[in-house]
């Protein structure tokens, strides 16, 4: 049996629910599992993480919001000292950055964007999509060194905290960060991260112009959804790139994805087609998005979205 370190994420001291997904993957591989969490709020988040079935938890604080080199240096010593065989983290910008750094530091290997696992221990086989999700590949490790896996969010059933209380160890005090992120501030009040969202509403060129995005924003505010976009409206300068869903944007997997005024190009589908329920709103009944949608509404998004918001609010009361 191997030793596994899961690296969970937190924001402002609150542990992200993806910790349960990391634990689920770790339990499938099998072995002794410890945890780590990074950043200024890591003390509080570590207490939450300690409630999962873990041997111990590292709270890593180098004195900044984020530092790829600093965090990797701080946790690397713990990986060597603890003799970990696997590190598992999320396929987020932080996870991609740290995963690559940790594999390189330990002469190991990194399999990214994992959506499933088969087998266990060193023989585990990871499944990951390629070519914008058109094929699923199976990838295995052939290294005795550190094996790093990053998980595509929401593809593993999240395990709940067990109420246990693992010991917490502080790390990172003396680490010198070469490049440090000092502030992370949400762009908009009530901003919901696309990766964490249960509901996403995305707008495409059907919004007509930059001002048209307000119909998406209003819906998101009413319903408590995260906001996304197609590349067409990002390239037009109507919305920031951080909202883009797709092959060259974010890959998301919410319970409900609403695509409004989006035609359904393969590059957009690559970022959202694993969503549990897909609703498409388009004024052209021949739009390709309807082929993958669970529910299709042929109509003007400027009429449909406000009505849908009204119906959802009424149903919730
Ligand atoms: C290498 C590469 C990478 C790419 N990566 C991405 C990516 O990551 N994400 C991405 O999204 N795209 C990506 N693209 C671009 C992609 O190919 C499409 O061009 C883009 O997704 C189209 O965006 P759209 O659906 O908003 O626009 P369009 O294709 O122009 O579709 C607009 C849709 O809105 C509908 N519509 C118009 N008015 C209304 C209305 N009032 N109400 C309802 N519906 C209306 C129209 O019927 C149409 O179907 C990439 C392309 C390349 C080549």
Image (cartoon, rainbow, N blue to C red):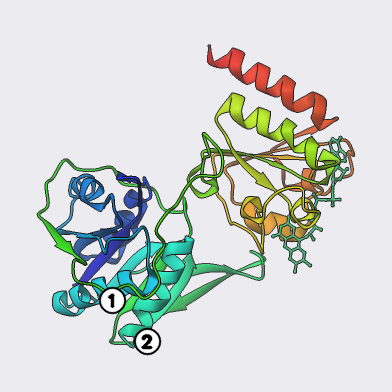
Asked if residue 178 can be seen in this view, the reply is yes
Q: Name the spot of residue 292 as percent of width and height, x first.
A: 72, 47
Viewport quadrant of the N terminus:
bottom left
- Residue drawn at x 9%, y 54% as measured from the top left: 167
Numbered label attached to residue 142: 2
Q: Does dot 2 land on a helix, a strand or a loop? A: loop
Q: Is residue 51 above or below residue 60?
A: above
Along the line of sight, the residue nearer the viewer: 313 or 32: 313
Along the line of sight, the residue nearer the viewer: 87 or 76: 76
Asked if residue 273 can be seen in this view, the reply is no
Numbered label attached to residue 73: 1
Q: Residues within 10 Å of mark 1 (few under 14, many from 20)?
A: some
What is the CA distance from the residue labelled 2 to the residue labelled 1? 25 Å
Q: Is residue 120 above or below residue 241?
A: below
The reply to whether callout 2 and callout 1 are in contact (CB within 8 Å) is no
Q: Is mark 1 within 8 Å of ligand 1?
A: no
Residue 294 location, quadrant:
top right
> Horizontal placement of 151 versus 294: left or right?
left
Q: Residues within 10 Å of mark 2 (few under 14, many from 20)?
A: few
Q: Name the spot of residue 203 as percent of width and height, x first.
A: 73, 42
Q: Name the spot of residue 295 as percent of width and height, x first.
A: 71, 34
Q: Is residue 286 above or below residue 141?
A: above
Foreground tag (2 vs 1): 1
> Horizontal placement of 236 versus 44: left or right?
right
- Residue drawn at x 17%, y 78% as measured from the top left: 83
- Residue drawn at x 59%, y 17% as measured from the top left: 313
Q: Name the spot of residue 42 as percent of width and height, x first.
A: 26, 52
């Amino acid at each position: 049996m191997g030793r596994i370190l899961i690296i969970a994420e937190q924001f402002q001291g609150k542990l992200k629910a993806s910790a349960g997904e990391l634990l689920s993957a770790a339990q499938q591989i099998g072995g002794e599992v410890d945890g780590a969490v990074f950043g200024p709020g890591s003390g509080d988040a570590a207490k939450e993480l300690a409630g999962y079935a873990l041997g111990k938890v590292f709270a890593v604080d180098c004195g900044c919001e984020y530092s790829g080199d600093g965090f990797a240096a701080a946790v690397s010593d713990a990986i060597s000292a603890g003799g970990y065989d696997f590190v598992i983290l999320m396929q987020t910008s932080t996870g991609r950055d740290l995963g690559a750094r940790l594999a390189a530091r330990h002469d190991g290997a990194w399999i990214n964007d994992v959506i499933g696992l088969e087998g266990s221990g060193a023989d585990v086989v990871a499944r990951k999509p390629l070519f914008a999700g058109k094929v699923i590949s199976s990838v295995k490790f052939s290294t005795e060194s550190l094996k790093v896996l990053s998980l595509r969010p929401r593809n593993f059933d999240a395990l709940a905290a067990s109420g246990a209380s693992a010991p917490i160890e502080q790390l990172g005090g003396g680490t010198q960060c070469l490049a440090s992120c000092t502030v992370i501030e949400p762009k908009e009040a009530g901003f919901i991260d696309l990766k964490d969202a249960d509901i996403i509403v995305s707008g495409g060129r059907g919004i007509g112009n930059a001002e048209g995005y307000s119909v998406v924003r209003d819906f998101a505010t009413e319903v408590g959804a995260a906001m996304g976009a197609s590349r067409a409206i990002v390239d037009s300068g109507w919305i920031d790139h951080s909202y883009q869903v797709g092959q060259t944007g974010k890959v998301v997997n919410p319970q409900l994805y609403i695509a409004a005024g989006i035609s359904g190009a393969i590059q957009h589908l690559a970022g959202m087609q694993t969503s549990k329920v897909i609703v498409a709103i388009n004024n052209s009944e021949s739009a390709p998005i309807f082929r993958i949608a669970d529910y299709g509404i042929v109509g003007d998004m400027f009429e449909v979205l406000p009505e849908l918001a009204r119906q959802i609010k009424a149903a919730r009361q």
